[in-house]
Structures are given as C-alpha cells and as structure tokens.
Image: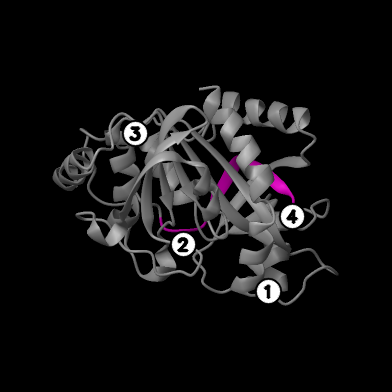
Amino acid sequence: MLEKIIETTKFLRAKGIIDPEAGIILGTGLGELTAKIDKRIEIDYKDIPNFPVSTVEGHAGKLIYGEFGKKKIVAMKGRFHYYEGYGAQQVALPVRVLKYLGIKCLFLSNAAGGVNPSFQIGDIMVITDHINLLPNPLIGQNDERIGARFPDMGEAYDKYLVNKALLIAEENNIRIHKGVYLSTSGPTFETPAEYRYFRIIGADAVGMSTTPEVIIARHMNLPCFAVSVITDLGVEGKIEYTTHESVQNEAAKTEARMTTIMTEMISSL
C-alpha cells in the first residue's frame, strides 16, 4: 500500500499539486462547490495511477487543486463506495494520498436521509459521531509506517472544527443541526423498519459513505470535519418515494449554504 501511495503522490506533485492545506471530499449533488476554486488544476481519476474511477451519477471523478477560501486545497469531486464493488484498499488509497500530499485537515460532505424527527429536507447536519455498518477499511495487515494497528475513534470528528462550523452558521443565519451519521453499504435506500432501527440505535441521519474515509483519516491522525445534507426523510409518516435523482436535486439546493460554511472554515485554518 505505501508504495502505491508514494507513486500516486509523486505523480500528482509532478502535475503541480504542491502543499495543499486542506482536502475536501464532495458527495452526491455537491460537486459544483468546486466551481469556487481559483487557479485550478484538474486531473481525471482515470489518469491518476492506482486511483479507482467513480461510477455513480453526480460524482464527476476529478481531482481539483487550487485556491479556495484563500488557501490551497485539493478536492475530490466524487468518491468511491463499497457498493460500486471497490475493496477496502481502493477506498483507502485516495484519502491516504491526500494526507501524503500534505493536507492538515479533511473536510467531507454527503447526502443523507434524516431519521431525526426534527429534521427537514434541505437541512445541514454537522456530524459529531458515527455508527459504521460498513466493513472496517482497516481490516487486514497493518503497515505501522502509515498508522497504528488500533487507532482511537473517541474524537472521529474534530470538536474545534465542529464548533467553528456552528458559529459560522449562526453568523450567516444558516439552519444547522448536530448529529450522528450511520453508514450502510447501499445501494438500496432503506426500508421503513430499517429507518426505525437506525433511529433506535442512535442515528440522526443515514447514508452510504463517509465513515470509511474518516476511519482511514483518523488512522493517520488527520483531523476530520463532515456534514450531511438531508435530502430525504426516514421518519414515520414522512417517508416518500426516493430516487438518486431526487437526492441529487435536493443536495444541489444547499450548495450556496454549504459553500459559505466551507469557505469560511477553510479561510480560518
């Protein structure tokens, strides 16, 4: 794994991706946030050694480097999921490469179904903790050069960054929540019984990504900040027919608010 990380990192540095201060992984319907990146370099995933390729609509499959919030950042416009058939090593490698490129913080976003009855479609939830029902990406042989065998997950989401986001939202009159994100494998949306179960065990929102990336980042002591856009509701009496297109459309409506929060957070790093 380390050899592949180094090979990919060298390739990207040769393309001009030098010393980014933050990394961003953008989820369904949120890729247009990258339009705010100036002095940009774009590289298709298919052209990057050892990188998987995005196969999901709404995930463009590009690595974008440039200035955002007056800082140098590298953004993944599209992520990789277990339901696409990728294994743990393939899901892990891009996050590890971001770390080896030099990022100091990892920012993540996703589209999620809300199971908290107080949530509304279009709300933004800052993730404070998670329940991972996906295969743990650290299963298998551990390379101590990359991270410890048993990483602590007591603060998977950085408290300073969480509080900073809440303050920015308040200053900009943006409705925001804190909550626990639960990840499943997908690609099916949840049944009403599953929604009830997830709420009982402590989830506020459910999706199909993010937790593997956070586990990988924390394995390397990389601070994380993540948000969910609530694109549908898994609350009894409010459950409606859900499609990938409807999720994309609702996620896109939040882009202006998401951009405000992310820009101010990255500017303050």
- Which residue occupies the extreme right position in the image? 237
The first of marks 4 and 1 along the sequence is 4
Q: Label 3 is placed on what type of residue? A: Met
Q: Earlier in the sequence, mark 2 or mark 3?
A: 2
Amino acid type at circle 1 is Thr
Q: Does the stretch in magenta take in 126? A: yes
What residue is disc 2 on?
Answer: 59
Specify the amino acid type for callout 4.
Gly
Task: Residue 113: tell me if it is visible.
Answer: no
Q: Of circles 4 and 1, which is in front?
A: 4
Q: Nearer the viewer, mark 4 or mark 3?
A: 4
In the image as oriented, which residue stretches furthest toward the front?
A: 39
SS state under label 2: loop
For residue 224, side relative to residue 246 (left or right): left
| Residue 114, above or below 242 | above
35 left or right, relative to 95: right
Q: State the residue position of label 1.
A: 242
- Badges 1 and 2: C-beta atoms under 8 Å apart? no
Residues packed near mark 2 inside 10 Å, few (<14), some (14 to 19) or many (20 plus):
many
Residues shaded magenta: 123-135
Give the residue pinned by disc 3. Answer: 220
The quarter holding residue 115 reads: bottom right
Kindly report the distance in space between the C-alpha atoms of the residues bearing marks 4 and 1.
14 Å
* Residue 139 image position (x, y, % from top left): 32, 51
